[in-house]
Amino acid sequence: MRVLIVEDDVETATQLVKGLGDSGHEADHAATGPMGLQNAREGGYDVMIVDRMLPGLDGLSLVRELRAGGDDTPVLFLTALADVDDRVAGLKSGGDDYLAKPFALAELLARMEAIARRQSRPAADMTLRLGDLEMNRLDRQVTRGNKQIALQPREFRLLEYFMLHAGQVVTRTMLLENVWGYHFDPQTNVIDVHVSRLRGKIELEGSPPLLHTVRGAGYCLREPD
Amino acid sequence: MSVKLIHTTAFRLAMRYAVFVSLLTVICFAIIYWITVGQLRSQIDAGLRAEVAALTRLYDLKGLPGLRQTVAALSTTKSLMESDTGDAGPRQYLLAGGDYDPLAGSLKHWPHGLSGSGTHWATVWVHEKNSRQHADSDWYHFQMRTVTVGLPGGYHLLVGQSLSEIDELRDSMFALMLAAVVLVLGAGLLGGAIVGRGVVRRLQAVTRTADTIMSGDLSQRIPQQQQRDEFGALAAKLNAMLERIEMLINSTREVTENVAHDLRSPLTRLRAGAEMALMQKASPEAREEALRRVVEEIDGIVATLNAILGIARIESGVNREWGDVDLTAVCHDAHELYEPLAEEKQLRLASQIAEGVHVRGNAQLMAQAMGNLLDNAIKYAPAPGQVSLVLERVGSDVAIMVMDNGPGIPVGKREKALERFVRLDSSRSLAGNGLGLSLVKAVADLHEARIVMEDNQPGLRIGLVFGDRS
């Protein structure tokens, strides 16, 4: 993916550019708001990572201006302000997701991929499929092979989220935010227990595993090789 | 800082009021004087008119000799009534011939400028030689209201009345007025000074306290007086404010110290890990392990900082989305989120959640607080066992309670447990940053809810009680 990073802290930006490069992405860096806006307008980016505090033009205004010009490149906001209300302000101005500094590169990559692929995904598919795992979103039936799998409502939503992001890394906070709707960090990792429960239901003996743990990042639901 | 007496509001108000009252007094006296003088003048004129009419009739009846005799007699009588000061008597008479030569009367000259024919009213100055001994001067002067008539036969008659009565009245009224003004101004000055001094003294108490506080002693309070007046109320309010400020500053200080202290251990480990990774002879595996620990430590520090900032934000109460919170739903969600965790620890999470319970507040914070309570309960409950979540209406209140059978919190340490970084488990064997209950307390305070901590025999029964605010 081609990524534009708008970030005034050169150290952070350099590391981001390198980190993204190591992960197979191609990243450009703009150090000020106006520069970022100019780069973005020249176009060609799959996703933008925008710091909220920028010299010249702050991140919110930058994205607002970009959106007003009809550009809908996915935007991930970075900020030192980590609060629900800041998050809401970021999303209102046209951002697609929000990440507080300091962050793990894995978290950034996962979220970036999630918002970048959101656009290409068929939003209203009634049936989701992954290997022999099949989910009917209309009558809420899940089967693996020929076997019917009974899921609790929350487990169903958890699996639905995994299937919509199949092949992508999904972090614990992404699950907490998108499946449970909580925008805070619980002290204990309750999410792991839920995921392992779900895993216990969808993984069958003799079948290849689908739901993988990605060390230091989260989980990934992907087709067996 | 000292306040000069004349600059006090009380003094200036008193002075302004005194000046105002003085002005009113002057105006009142002027009006009274004006009315009285008017009445006196018309009385004088009426008297003179009657006298002239009577004398004219006498002249008609008895002719010149009779009038002359009467005028002479009247003048003598009036002369006898002259006052000791040499003033002319109240009434003056003069009968004069055709060329104004005096024939009889108390005046020795016909006043200048008074013509003789017809009836004329005038006010003239009279200068007469003093006829009495021991007088202050040879001449005396007075103002006189006169009426002159021309008599048949070319004679002229003048009847006049000295206006000294009016002068006397004016003098005495002026003196009275002056006395009144002096009295009012004096009283205002004195009253203002007394009140002003009182105000200054009471304000100085506040100023002194402020000085002491500014020099660093936050425990100082404004001395409280018995009076329940506005100063007493102000002092009480200021003291309450100081109380709150001192509390906040102390808690800030405490938090800063705690943060510094609590970050020291992870930073030490962090440094050790980084040094380990830098060592030449470290194996790639050891290096990787050290760096992984470094990242973990940093995540821990960030989590702690976020928790502190979160609590601070909640306590500041700013920027909060406020709305209707479906507590029933929040409880069901919390149960659903924590149930697998409890099960994994071989605990049963038993819930008893009342339907349709709503309060005003922030749903995210409420969920976070409840999460922390459940997290603690699950952490401390002995396995196998049970943790309970109850949402119930108690009278008009709403209570959320979480119960466990863990070690509980001794009565004396319950308040302490809500403070930041306080971990009652001194061995610190369980993970945690000591901020969980602080967050619960901050959320409770923001929602004006009470935190209830009771003995669950054994274990802890802790929860929030929302008062009826519908």
Image: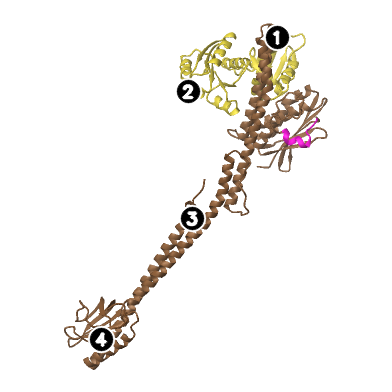
Can you give x and y, in whole percent of width and height, for residue B356 in the image?
70, 36
- Gap in Å between the C-alphas at discs 2 and 1? 45 Å
* Residue B409 in magenta stretch: yes
| Residues at discs 1 and 3 both on one chain | yes
Write down the residue under mark 3. B11
Let me know if residue A154 appears in the view.
yes
Residue B327 inside the magenta-drawn segment: no
Q: Which mark is residue B105?
A: 4
Chain identity of mark 2: A
The hue of chain A in the figure is: yellow
Q: In the rendered structure, which segment of residues is drawn in magenta?
A: B407-417
Residue B286: mark in rendering: 1
Crowd rating for badge 1 (residues with CA inside 10 Å; few <14, some 14–19, many 20+): few
Which of the marked residues, 1 or 4, is nearer the chain's N terminus?
4
Tell me the distance, in whole angstroms, between the alpha carbons under discs 1 and 4: 144 Å
Q: Is residue B418 above or below residue A221?
A: below
Residue type, mark 3 in image = Phe
Q: Is residue A126 left or right of residue B50?
A: right
Kind of residue sitting beneath label 4: Gly
On the same chain, marks 3 and 2? The answer is: no
Q: Type of residue at label 2?
A: Leu
Identify by letter the chain in brown: B
Q: Nearer the viewer, mark 3 or mark 2?
A: 3
Crowd rating for badge 4 (residues with CA inside 10 Å; few <14, some 14–19, many 20+): many
Tell me which colouring the rendered structure shows: by chain
Residue A57's label in the rendered image is 2
Q: Are discs 4 and 2 less than 8 Å apart at CB?
A: no
Q: Residue furthest left?
A: B99
Please state which of residues B213 and B48 is positioned toward the viewer in this rendering. B213
